Amino acid sequence: MIHTPLTITTLGATVIAAVIATLAMTGCTPAWAADPLPTATIETSAPPAAAVPSSPTPTASRTTSAPQTAYPVAAISGGVDVHSQPDPLAPAVTVEATTPYGTDRVLRIVEATADGSWFRVVIPARPNNATGWIPAADIDVRAVSHHISVDLSERSLVLTQGGIEILRTTVAVGTAANPTPTGEFFVTDMLETDPDGAYGPYAFGVAAWSETLSQFGDGDGQIAIHGTDDPGALGTAASHGCIR
């Protein structure tokens, strides 16, 4: 399973996020295989371009200004307690070893204690980017080199690996009524979907939830990055918060 950092930004600010590839989204559902997932960033900056291509357009590999080239993630082999403080007696919530879609759980690491005995991780639940502490002994630390950056204003998505751009494409984003949340997130799942369906062949769950929808389809309002059967909507604000 590859877990990738993700950054979503708005109004010119760029926020980096770790995306862990396992999918749980607002009514979307894809699947992946065995390595930490890439990180991702979703941002909104420049106004939408006047002319937008009607289909994804990969570019030749080239170096970009990715914020960083490696992102630490924590893999867990069983359910773990995430504490409010780096203290085994502090209040805790339990994070299961797999996601609701059956993907092995990986969490984004954002901080460590000076002695390295505890890691602060992002909890994949509402509110977005809530964090807690896990003992180092309970996790397996891995490095992720993939990063996804989404600019909501330009309606663009860029995938890099080790700071090298390997894909740039136009996307559809959330509407004004149901905007795509911005910030630092991580991918939770990758699911295979119907290639001819509304979500295309794959959907990637992102550890971010809609701020306007508590439920969407069969899901709980978690957003995703997925394909589309409506290429004419690319470059517009057309989704319920997902990145198409």
Image (cartoon, helix red, strand yellow):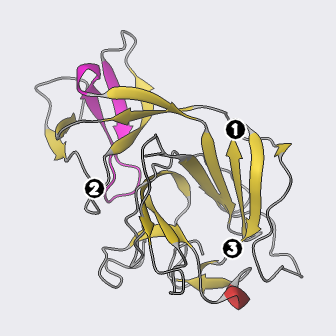
Name the amino acid, label 2: Thr
Q: Hey, which quadrant is residue 134 in on the image?
A: top left
Q: Are marks 2 and 3 in contact (CB under 8 Å)?
A: no
**Can residue 208 be seen in this snapshot?**
no
Q: Residue at x 51, y 30 (%)?
A: 143
Picture layout, residue 189 above or below residue 104? below
Q: Residue at x 27, y 58 (%)?
A: 102
Alpha-carbon distance for marks 2 and 1? 28 Å
How crowded pointer 2 is (Cα within 10 Å; few <14, some 14-19, many 20+) is rated as: some
Q: Which disc number belongs to residue 99?
A: 2
Is 122 on the left or on the right of 232, as rendered? Answer: left
Picture layout, residue 95 above or below residue 26? above
Secondary element at image label 1 = loop
Q: Nearer the viewer, mark 2 or mark 1?
A: 2
Name the amino acid, label 3: Val
Residue beneath disc 1: 67
Residue beneath disc 3: 171
Q: Position of residue 187 (x, y in %)?
A: 46, 53
Q: Hey, which quadrant is residue 216 in on the image?
A: bottom left
Name the amino acid, label 1: Pro
Residue at the extreme top of the image, as rendered? 115
Alpha-carbon distance for marks 2 and 3? 26 Å
Alpha-carbon distance for marks 3 and 1? 21 Å
Report the magenta residues as a range: 118-138
Q: Residue at x 44, y 56 (%)?
A: 32
Is 120 on the left or on the right of 102, as rendered? Answer: right
Picture layout, residue 67 above or below residue 237? above
Q: Position of residue 172 (x, y in %)?
A: 65, 78
